[in-house]
Amino acid sequence: MSPSRRDFIRYVGLFLASAIARGCGVPPTVTCYEVAPISPEPTPPANERWAALRDCWYSLDDPRVQSFEDNDFIVGLRGQHQEALAALVAAGELDAAVAEEIAVAFGQAIAHIQRNQATCYIALPPEFQPRADLLSQEAALEEMAAQGNLDPAVVEQARAALARDIEWLSQFQAGQVPGSLEEIEADPNAIAAARILVELLLGSK
């Protein structure tokens, strides 16, 4: 029987964790004796909380999000994302300050999709590039997870780019003027949020 998507994602997470932990491009071979048997039991609650958050990010390519204004699906998706973050914070699995950074990133991702639908960014405001980069990194990581094509160097580049994008967008949403995206320096919360998003989108959370 072919492995399910959940089983496949679990192996992807093991592969990535092994590669990054050893700082090398090719991790040791994982055999059936090294990986615990996949249990038919229900997913543990902690995994369900992370899965709920991941499902929100995976839903960004849903056709119902391609709207220039809020609809019931978008409103519900925002609510589900916030509820998933709140559950993780309440369970002590996610720092509240890092959760705020992830919330900013998700909100800005939806804003980018809606702005594209409404005006196509005719004037190309400063927030266009970090929003667009955030979504492109999300899409690339999701595709990598689906294909199993994990290059640790590319994963690290995505993590660094996400940290920069999140920092820029957090400052922007706070009413600050972040300046050049290339010169932005991410703070520890943005870096932590980027790391969690990479793990989440690759399925290792």
Image (cartoon, rainbow, N blue to C red):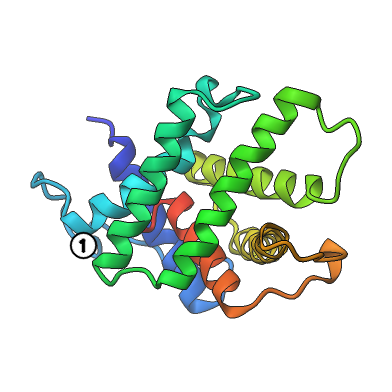
Residue 86, quarter of the rendered image: bottom left
Rendered-image quadrant of the C terminus: bottom left
Amino acid type, callout 1: Tyr
Front residue of this view, candidates 202 and 151: 202
Residue 73 relative to residue 106: left or right: left
Up/down of 141 relative to 23, above or below: above
For mark 1, give the secondary structure: loop
Question: From this viewpoint, is residue 109 visible?
Answer: yes
Image mark count? 1
**Residue at the left extreme of this rendering:** 41
Residue 132 relative to residue 69: left or right: right
Rendered-image quadrant of the N terminus: top left
Where residue 190 sits: x, y (%)? 59, 70
- Name the residue at 33% across, 49% down: 83
Residue 94, quarter of the rendered image: bottom left
Where residue 62 sits: x, y (%)? 50, 25
Where residue 32 sits: x, y (%)? 24, 56
Q: Name the residue under label 1.
A: 33
- Name the residue at 64% across, 66% down: 163
- Name the residue at 24% across, 50% down: 48
Front residue of this view, candidates 55 and 111: 111
Question: From this viewpoint, is residue 10 visible?
Answer: no
Residue 170 relative to residue 185: left or right: left
Residue 157 relative to residue 20: left or right: right
Where residue 117 sits: x, y (%)? 71, 24
**Residue at the right extreme of this rendering:** 123
Up/down of 91 relative to 114, above or below: below
- Name the residue at 38% across, 58% down: 204
Crowdedness near tag 1: few (<14), some (14–19) or many (≥20) residues, C-alpha within 10 Å: few
Residue 6, quarter of the rendered image: top left
